[in-house]
Image (spheres, rainbow, N blue to C red):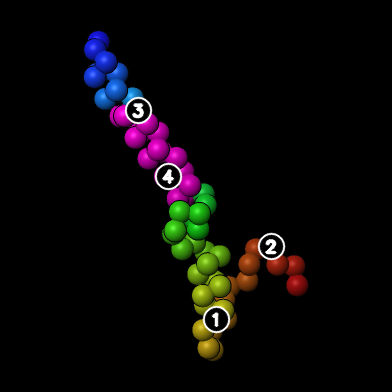
């Protein structure tokens, strides 16, 4: 294999790895990648007049 094939192969591998990492972050930590998750939606709802958000699972009171 020539040097060009190694470079193209490396670019493809890095691209696939980056997409997989982004997909994992989007599923498990959506706020980190700019997707509005449940916590952010509840925060937005709590700032609207007359609406109350769903209780957060970690709230004890």
Give the label on residue 58, or none.
2
Label pair 2/3, CB-CB below 8 angstroms: no
Inter-mark Cα distance, 4 to 3: 14 Å
Q: Residue at x 27, y 15 (%)?
A: 3
Q: Quadrant of residue 10?
A: top left
Inter-mark Cα distance, 1 to 3: 44 Å
Q: In front of the other: label 1 or label 2?
A: 1
Q: Quadrant of residue 8?
A: top left
Q: Secondary structure at mark 3?
A: helix
Q: Earlier in the sequence, mark 1 or mark 2?
A: 1
Give the label on residue 13, or none.
3
Name the main secondary structure of what is drawn in magenta.
helix
Pick the front one: 42 or 1: 1
Q: Residue at x 45, y 50 (%)?
A: 26
Magenta residues, start to end: 11-27
Identify the residue position indicated by label 1 in the image: 47
Identify the residue position indicated by label 4 in the image: 22
Q: Residue at x 44, y 58 (%)?
A: 34
Q: In front of the other: label 1 or label 3?
A: 3
């Amino acid at each position: 294999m020539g040097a060009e094939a190694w470079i193209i192969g490396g670019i493809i591998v890095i691209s696939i790895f980056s997409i997989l990492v982004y997909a994992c972050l989007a599923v498990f930590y959506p706020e980190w990648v700019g997707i509005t998750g449940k916590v952010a939606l509840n925060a937005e709802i709590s700032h609207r007049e007359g609406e109350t958000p769903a209780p957060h699972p970690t709230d004890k009171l």
